[in-house]
Every structure is written in structure tokens, then in C-alpha cells.
Image: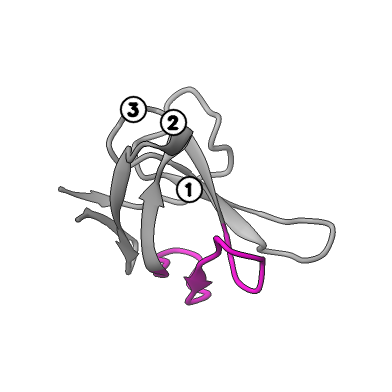
Amino acid sequence: MTVEAKRVDDIDGPDVAPGSFEFFDTSERKDAGMLYACPCGCKRVGALYFRPHPSPAWQWDCNREHPTLSPSIHDQPKGKTHWHGHLKAGRWKSC
């Protein structure tokens, strides 16, 4: 399954599509990570921190419209695998 990653202003909006994302800042730095709507369509929102944040954290290519993160995203709420895949060039792809 491949889903387009679409940048939005508010990830909590009522009509946010699966795979949508928005960047967030922290008091320490701008673009500290991203919030994303699960690409599977379940409407779950997750957070991904960018390095150098302590693990788990992802390397971001600084592309704000078509981002790439590495390594893979392994979404595990409550310790169980929910979704596992990659975000490359603005496309979510399941493993």
C-alpha cells in the first residue's frame, strides 16, 4: 500500500486524509518533528521526532513538501505493531 503524504496546517482537522502531516516546534528548536495521520486510515495521530532528539528519532531530509525519514516508522501503540513502513519522497509505503 502506498499513500501520498500531504502537508496540512492542522492535523486534528475534521477532514484530514490518511498520511497527512504537520511539523511541530519545541521550545528548543523549530521543526523538531512531525505529527502524522496514520497512513492506514484509522485516524490515529502519531508523533515522530527528528534527530538529534533522543531515540526514537528519525533523520529528516529537510524537504517540507515531500519529506523522507529514516529509518522506517514502526508504529506500536500499546506495544503492538499497528503500522510499519517508510516515508520516502512524500509517499508512505507499507513494509
Residue for badge 3: 42
Please name whichever residue, 29 or 9, is drawn nearer the observer in this view of the structure. 29
Which residue occupies 73% across, 64% down? 30
- Single out the residue that lies furthest toward the left: 1
Which residue occupies 50% across, 73% down? 59
How far is disc 3 from disc 1 in space, using C-alphas? 14 Å
Highlighted range, magenta: 49-70
Tell me: 10 left or right of 85.
right
Are the residues flagged by discs 2 and 3 in contact, CB closer than 8 Å? yes
Circle 3 Cα neighbour tier, 10 Å, few/some/many (<14 / 14–19 / ≥20) = few
Work out whether 78 lies above or below 92.
above
Give residue 21's mark.
1
How far is disc 2 from disc 3 in space, using C-alphas? 6 Å
Circle 2 Cα neighbour tier, 10 Å, few/some/many (<14 / 14–19 / ≥20) = few
**Residue 26, position in %: x, y?**
77, 56
Q: Nearer the viewer, mark 3 or mark 1?
A: 3
The quarter holding residue 92 reads bottom left
- Looking at the rendered structure, the secondary structure element under dot 2 is loop
